[in-house]
Amino acid sequence: MTEAVLPERRGGLRDRLAAWRDRTLADPRFQRWASGFPLTRPVARRRTRALFDLCAGFVYAQTLAACVELKLFPLLRNGPRSTDSLAPDLRLSPAAAERLLKAAAALELVSARRDGRWSLGPLGAAMLGNPGVEAMVRHHAMLYRDMADPVGLLRGERRETALASYWPYARADDPAALDRDQVADYSALMSASQHLVAEDVLDAFPLDGFNRLMDVGGGDGTFLRAVAARSATPDLILFDLPPVAALARESFAKAGLSDRARAVGGTIFREPLPKGADAVTLIRVLHDHDDAAARTILRAVAGALPPGGTLLVAEPMSGTPGGAPITDAYFGFYLLAMGSGHTRTPVRLREMLREAGFGAIREPRTRRPLMTRLLVSRRNDTLTDNTP
Ligand SMILES: CC(C)=CCC/C(C)=C/CC/C(C)=C/C=C/C(C)=C/C=C/C=C(C)/C=C/C=C(C)/C=C/C=C(C)/C=C/CC(C)(C)O
Ligand SMILES: C[S@@+](CC[C@H](N)C(=O)[O-])C[C@H]1O[C@@H](n2cnc3c(N)ncnc32)[C@H](O)[C@@H]1O
C-alpha cells in the first residue's frame, strides 16, 4: 500500500537544520515576535488563519450542510432577498436566519449587499450549478459520524462504520449477495456526482472510434448514458454487481438505449468479464480497492480486452498539485471509514497497469484534475503475469 520511499538518512545536516527550524517555529516567543515583525507578520497571519481554519473546518462544513438542508441557495436563485423575507422560507426565526446568513456570507456561500439584502455568493452559485455536490454534502453526515473518533478509525477499532454500511461491497464476503436496497443509495449518489466526471473524461478522451465500450463498475449507467449522448460508439456494455446492473438496465430502458446498451450483473472477483469490447472504462473504481483487489480487477480487464484494446482509468489521484487535502486527507479517511482502498499516484497506477499487461500509457489532461485524472493505456499483445 505504501509507495517506495527513499531510505531515510538520519542525523545528517539536513535533519539537524529541519529540527532547528521546527523548534524555532514551535517556540511561542518566536511566534509572538514573528507576528509583530513587519517582514514575517504576513506569513504569521496566514498560518494563524490556516490553523484556525483547520480547527473550525467542521463548523464551516456544517454551515454548508445547514444551507443545503434549508435549501437556501435555490431561494436566492432569482435575485437578492432580505432576511425577513427569507426567514419563513427557511423555517427559522429572523434572528436565526440572520445568524446563518452571516455565517454563509463569511464562507462566500452568500453575499451581503449594501442594502442589507442577501444574494448568492460565488461558492453558493457554484453549489447551484453542481447538484451532485449537494448530494455529497447530505451524505457527509455519515462520514462525520465516523470521523467523530478518528483515532479509533485509524486503529481499526471501529469496524461498524456508517460508511461501511453505506458502501457494503467494500467489506462484503460475497458482494453478489447484496440486494437492491443495499446498493440503491450509493448508486444514486454516484449518479448525482457523475456529470462533472463524465464531462471531464469525455472532453479529455472523446471515446469515438470504438466498436464496443464496456464500463466496469459502471453503477446505474450514468456514465454510459453520457457516452451515448456524445459519442458514436455503437455498443455499450455495463458490468456491475447484479442489483446495480438491474438499476442500469432500467435507466437504459428509460433513456431509450436498450438496443445499444446492455447491463451484465456479476462480481468482478468471481465471474469473468464479458468479452468483445475494444475499450474498457474504470471510472472511480480502482481507488475503492486495496492493491491485491485492484490488481485482480486490472488483470480481469486485460483478459477481457483484445490485444491493442484500450483501457481508461479515471479517478482522483494522489500527487496532483494542490490536491493533497482532497486525496490524502479527505479520501484517505473516507476510504478508511468505508473499509477498503486508497488513492494512488499516476506513477503507482502506471506500474500496476504495466504489471497487468498494459502499455502505451498516457495521461490526457482533464479540466478539473483535482477531482478526476485520466490514464489511457493499451493492452499488450501478449499477457504475462508481471506481478512482483
Ligand atoms: C462572470 C465573472 C464576472 C467572473 C467569472 C469568474 C469566474 C471564472 C468564476 C468561476 C465560476 C465557475 C466556473 C465555478 C465553478 C465551480 C465548480 C465547478 C465547482 C465545483 C465544485 C465541486 C465540488 C465541491 C466537489 C465535491 C466533491 C466531493 C465532495 C466528492 C466526493 C466523492 C466521493 C465521496 C466519492 C465516493 C466514491 C468512492 C467510494 C470513493 O469510490
Ligand atoms: C464508486 S462506484 C463508481 C460507479 C461509477 N463508475 C461512477 O463513477 O459513478 C464503484 C462501483 O463499483 C461496483 N463494484 C464494487 N465491487 C464490485 C465487484 N466486486 N464487482 C462488480 N462491481 C463492483 C459498485 O457496485 C459501484 O457501482
Image: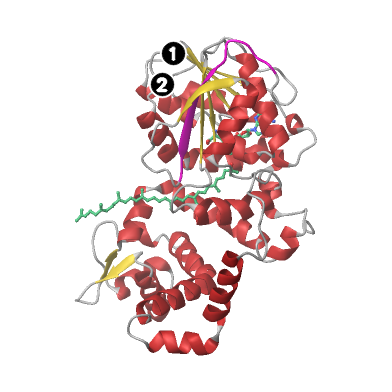
Q: Secondary structure at mark 1?
A: loop
Residue 207: mark in rendering: 2
At label 2, which amino acid type do we have? Leu
Q: Residue 261, position in %: x, y?
A: 50, 17
In this orientation, which residue lies closer to the viewer: 334 or 163? 334
In the picture, residue 195 is in which quadrant? top left
Q: Which residue is mark 1?
A: 210
The amino acid sitting under disc 1 is: Phe
**Residue at horizontal 42 percent and vertical 15 percent from the top:** 233
Q: Which residue: 66% across, 22% down?
A: 299
Give the residue at x 55% y 42%: 345
Position of 68 relative to 261 (above/below): below
Looking at the rendered structure, which numbered label has been put on residue 23? none
At label 2, counting other C-alpha atoms closer than 10 Å, the crowd grade (few under 14, some 14-19, many 20 or more) is some
Q: Position of residue 83 (x, y in %)?
A: 31, 74
Q: From mark 2 to mark 1, how far is it between C-alphas?
A: 7 Å
Query: Quick check: can you spot residue 225?
Result: yes
**Disc 1 C-beta below 8 A from ligand 2:** no
Can you tell which quarter of the image residue 243 is in?
top right
Q: Do the CB atoms of the residues marked 2 and 1 lie less than 8 Å apart?
A: yes
Q: Point out the stretch of residues depicted in magenta.
A: 371-384
In the rendered image, the quadrant that contains the N terminus is top right
From this view, report whether residue 168 is shown above or below residue 270: below
Q: Is 239 inside the magenta-drawn segment? A: no
From the viewer's perspective, is 310 left or right of 11? left
Q: Which residue corresponds to the image point at 53% horizontal and 46% vertical from the top-left?
A: 318
Q: Residue furthest left?
A: 115
